């Protein structure tokens, strides 16, 4: 039974405050969870409550959310069995009482929801992935390493937010981690040799001031080859355009040019023809449903089209996408929806509907590794947690190494099969 719930304000990887929650059970178990925070947030995400008091952290404090955990959410679930995750999440939603969790804050609610799951797992003496996923949880994900950071994650001129290495040809997760890391280091040398800065962006990738988005992909190919791998077969590429960020009044602004959705779609077709790209996320803006539909008709049979800001891990928005035939993959961010149960609902809906899923960190992260367990629990097969650098990114990959070890012979690396529409 849940005996007490506590909370505190801690810092995330960008030096902004965030919520950490601790749950104490009557058997003495204590577990904690910390909440991540985005920069290129979707308009339809659950609400992140910040104090707005400019005298603290520039208004970004989260003391109100912390107070809501201590005064309202905690007392509402005290005495409830910690394994009753769905009951608890419903109580949390009810206490808030709004559609988008804006009264007490999705950051308050998520912290409680995740800490409860971890405490329940610990109390059952199970690793979190096993507790959440049951006996069939066995699939180790392809890590998508965001090795070049642009958009709102870096102060360079690159419009697209994320350039991924996807080591689909590796035999195991640990091998994929090594391959991606080796290429990451070679990439640094290549950028340096070409006269670009090698400082890091918010997700641990390099943030060079490249003249075009296409150039980013070219650097990745060069680095993959120089590190001794074959582009496409060993290591494929991916993008998160985060297109909402460069969409304004009906116009996409990319590479210093204006584009409509059709022209931008043709641009993506060109990239997919020229590079071994297996996945593109948020290729178009969060409300451009018509553009998304046309894009899916053109490219959906060749590559994975991931909805992040488009779906915001929200089963209702995902259902709309499924009905309209937009995208073919769901990006999963626990804090976009705010409870573990709703996150699992979105994942199940995606899988039932033939959509793939990719578990995701946020650009503002903490040392919390819940998503590493979650990705194995649901057999998703894909995770993005930034570059193989900076502890808040690497913490998730390191946790996956531990899970791989724990699973032993039962572990299966998703590899190429994680991308059913892989074009080679
Ligand atoms: P965010 O970016 O965490 O800043 O929203 C991640 C993403 O767009 O996938
Ligand atoms: Zn995204």
Image (cartoon, rainbow, N blue to C red):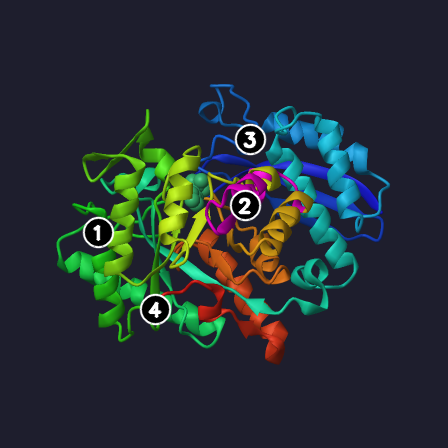
Give whichever of discs 3 and 4 has the lower sequence position: 3
Q: Where is residue 386 in the image (x, y as percent from the top left)?
A: 41, 53
Count of picture labels? 4
Gap in angstroms between the C-alphas marked 4 and 1: 19 Å
Q: Point out the tag, 2 or 4, that comes first from the N-terminus.
A: 2
Point out the tag, 1 or 3, that comes first from the N-terminus.
3
Give me the disc on residue 214.
1
Label at residue 424: 4
The numbered mark at residue 380 is: none
Q: Is residue 369 visible?
A: no
Which circle, 1 or 3, is nearer the viewer?
1
Q: Quadrant of ligand 1?
A: top left
Indicate which disc, 2 or 1, sits on the residue closer to the N terminus.
1
Helix, strand or loop at mark 4: loop
Separation of marks 2 and 1 at Cα, in angstroms:
30 Å
Q: Contact (CB < 8 A) between labels 2 and 4?
A: no
Q: What residue span does the magenta drawing correspond to? A: 318-340
Asked whether the residues under the numbered discs 4 and 1 touch, taking CB atoms below 8 Å apart as contact, a structural biologist would say: no
Q: What element carries label 2?
A: helix
């Amino acid at each position: 039974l849940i005996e007490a719930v506590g909370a505190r304000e801690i810092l995330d990887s960008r030096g902004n405050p965030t919520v950490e929650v601790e749950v104490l059970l009557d058997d003495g178990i204590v577990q904690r969870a910390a909440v991540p925070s985005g920069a290129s947030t979707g308009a339809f995400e659950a609400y992140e409550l910040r104090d707005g008091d400019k005298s603290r952290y520039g208004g970004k404090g989260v003391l109100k959310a912390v107070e809501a955990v201590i005064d309202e959410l905690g007392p509402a679930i005290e005495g409830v069995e910690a394994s009753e995750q769905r009951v608890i999440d419903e109580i949390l939603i009810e206490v808030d009482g709004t559609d988008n969790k804006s009264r007490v804050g999705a950051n308050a609610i998520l912290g409680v929801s995740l800490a409860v799951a971890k405490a329940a797992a610990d109390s059952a003496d199970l690793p979190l992935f096993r507790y959440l996923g049951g006996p069939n949880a066995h699939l180790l994900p392809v890590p998508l390493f965001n090795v070049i950071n642009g958009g709102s994650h870096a102060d360079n001129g690159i419009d697209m937010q994320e350039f991924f290495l996807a080591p689909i040809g590796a035999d195991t997760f640990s091998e994929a981690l090594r391959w991606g890391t080796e290429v990451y280091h070679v990439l640094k040398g290549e950028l340096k040799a070409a006269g670009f800065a090698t400082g890091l962006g918010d997700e641990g990738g390099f943030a060079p001031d490249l003249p075009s988005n296409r150039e980013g992909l070219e650097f990745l190919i060069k680095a993959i080859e120089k590190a001794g791998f074959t582009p496409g077969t060993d290591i494929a590429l991916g993008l998160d355009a985060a297109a909402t960020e460069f969409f304004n009044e009906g116009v996409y602004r990319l590479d210093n040019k204006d584009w409509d959705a059709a022209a931008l779609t043709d641009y993506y077709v060109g990239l997919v023809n020229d590079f071994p790209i297996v996945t593109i996320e948020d290729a178009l803006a969060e409300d451009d449903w018509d553009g998304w539909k046309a894009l899916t008709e053109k490219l959906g049979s060749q590559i994975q089209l991931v909805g992040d800001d488009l779906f915001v891990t929200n089963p209702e928005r995902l259902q709309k996408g499924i009905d309209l035939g937009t995208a073919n993959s769901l990006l999963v961010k626990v804090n976009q929806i705010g409870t573990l149960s709703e996150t699992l609902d979105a994942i199940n809906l995606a899988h039932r509907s033939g959509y793939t899923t990719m578990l995701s960190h946020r650009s503002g992260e903490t040392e919390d590794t819940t998503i590493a367990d979650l990705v194995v629990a649901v057999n998703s097969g894909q995770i993005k947690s930034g570059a193989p650098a900076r502890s808040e990114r690497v913490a998730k990959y390191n946790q996956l190494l531990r899970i791989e070890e724990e699973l032993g012979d039962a572990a299966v690396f998703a590899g190429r099969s994680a991308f059913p529409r892989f074009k080679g």
